[in-house]
Image: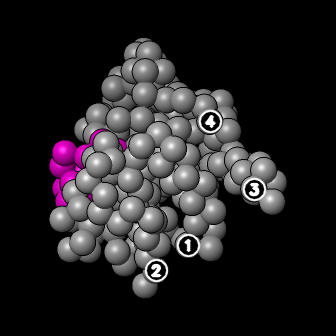
Amino acid sequence: MYEYKKKGYLDMKKKHRVLLYVLLERRDIGTAYVLSELLEHMDCECYIAGSNSYCSKFVRMWNPNAIIFGTLSRLQTFSKIYPNAHLFYYPVEGGESYEFTNDKNLAEDQNYFNKLSGIYLWGQFSKDHILRRARELKHKSFLYGQESLLDEKCKIIGHPRLDFIRYYRNEV
């Protein structure tokens, strides 16, 4: 079980409580840490939780305002446990080929899509995967012919691990 607690444990003076979910700690902790530092500079209180702690009693009572996560398989769980939280998705395994990406599944389920407050992708190719899937499904996809819906929620942010490297170089 892995938990990482930031300073300011339950400081209610902070405006927003942000839960940063890490699926694989070794891979994702660097990105989550840098993001937590940036969010704390924006007056947010952050908590980094792993697979064993994201739905713990403490986190439920803390009641995050926003959840940032990197795997679509947790979307349903987060929306049930924290119905009032804003959900933000960024793929931890971005850059995959069309055959292996999970991002394309966003074109298949409007309910899934509507639960997200924001989608942050590594590059235009990831966004193109979603649009390609919508074109394949045609009228079975709610995005078919309404690509502007994706434009409203989606931002291209680049590779999050490169941000970690830039942050590390500035701190050393």
Q: How would you rate the neighbour count of disc 2 (Cα within 10 Å): few for under 14, some for 14-19, many for 20 or more?
A: few
Of 154 and 163, which appears nearest the observer?
Answer: 163
Q: Considering only order in the chain, which callout, 1 or 4, is on the residue closer to the N terminus?
A: 1
- Identify the element where label 3 is drawn: helix
What x and y, as percent, mark residue 137? 43, 31
Q: How would you rate the neighbour count of disc 3 (Cα within 10 Å): few for under 14, some for 14-19, many for 20 or more?
A: few
Residue hosting label 2 = 2
Residue hosting label 1 = 25
Q: Closer to the observer: label 4 or label 2? A: 2
Tell me the kind of residue under disc 3. Glu
Span shown in magenta: 77-87
What x and y, as percent, mark residue 113? 34, 37
Residue hosting label 3 = 171
- Residue 76 — which label? none
- Identify the element where label 2 is drawn: loop
Q: Report, in whole angstroms, how far the alpha carbon at label 1 lies from the one at label 2.
A: 8 Å
- Identify the element where label 4 is drawn: loop
Tell me whether circle 3 and circle 1 mark residues in contact (CB < 8 Å): no
Tell me the kind of residue under disc 2. Tyr
